[in-house]
Amino acid sequence: MTKAKYTLEYPFNSSEKVLFNRLSTASGLSEWFADDVFVSDNIYTFVWDGFEQKAEMLSRKTPESVKFKWIDEDSEADENDFFEFKIRKDDLTGETALIVTDFAPEDEQEEAIELWDTQINSLKQKLGI
């Protein structure tokens, strides 16, 4: 099934360094993104309700962006099977934004966006925002 790219932007009242830590480390990601996260080399294992899913960290540019590619043994390699976090700081206003890029089948995008909204709200709560 073909996946379509979508991008979401969330305002954050947080320092880039603190936010980046929550997006790029196992301990940070386990606070809001998954129940638990383990890292071995560049492979992150995300655990939700006992279910595991692995992703490879493709790139990391501190404190600007981190990109993960899902590893799925059951399906063909798909270049659109990644998700990315970018932190953008507006030099003029000083506002920080988190930009999430992900892919989902078009008929599942609305649900995927709702899931990201829920996850990002959890992240904001953990940061005290």
Image (cartoon, grey):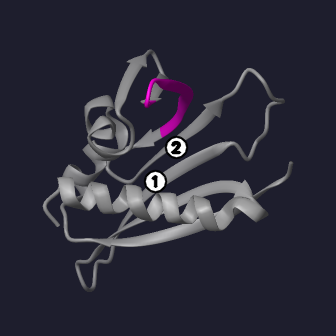
Q: Crowdedness of circle 1 by 10 Å Cα count: few (<14), some, many (20+)? A: many
- Please give the range of residues in magenta: 48-59
Q: Tell me the crowding category of disc 2: few under 14, some 14 to 19, or many 20 or more residues within 10 angstroms, Cα based.
A: many
In the picture provided, is 36 more to the left or to the right than 74?
Answer: left
Residue drawn 36% across the image and 39% down it = 24
Sequence order check, earlier mark of 2 and 1: 2
| Residue at the far top in the pictured view | 40
**What is the total number of numbered labels drawn onto the structure image?**
2
Can you give x and y, in whole percent of width and height, for residue 56 in the image?
55, 28
The kind of residue tagged 1 is Phe
Magenta-drawn stretch contains 49: yes
The alpha-carbon separation of the residues under discs 2 and 1 comes to 6 Å
Above-or-below relation of 98 to 31:
below
Q: Position of residue 93 (x, y in %)?
A: 25, 85
Q: At x 32% / y 34%, what residue is drawn?
A: 25
Rendered image quadrant of residue 5:
bottom right
Find numbered disc 2 in the image and state the secondary structure of the residue it sits on: strand
Residues at discs 2 and 1 in contact (Cβ within 8 Å): yes
Q: Mark 1 points at which residue?
A: 85
Per the rendering, the mark at residue 67 is: 2
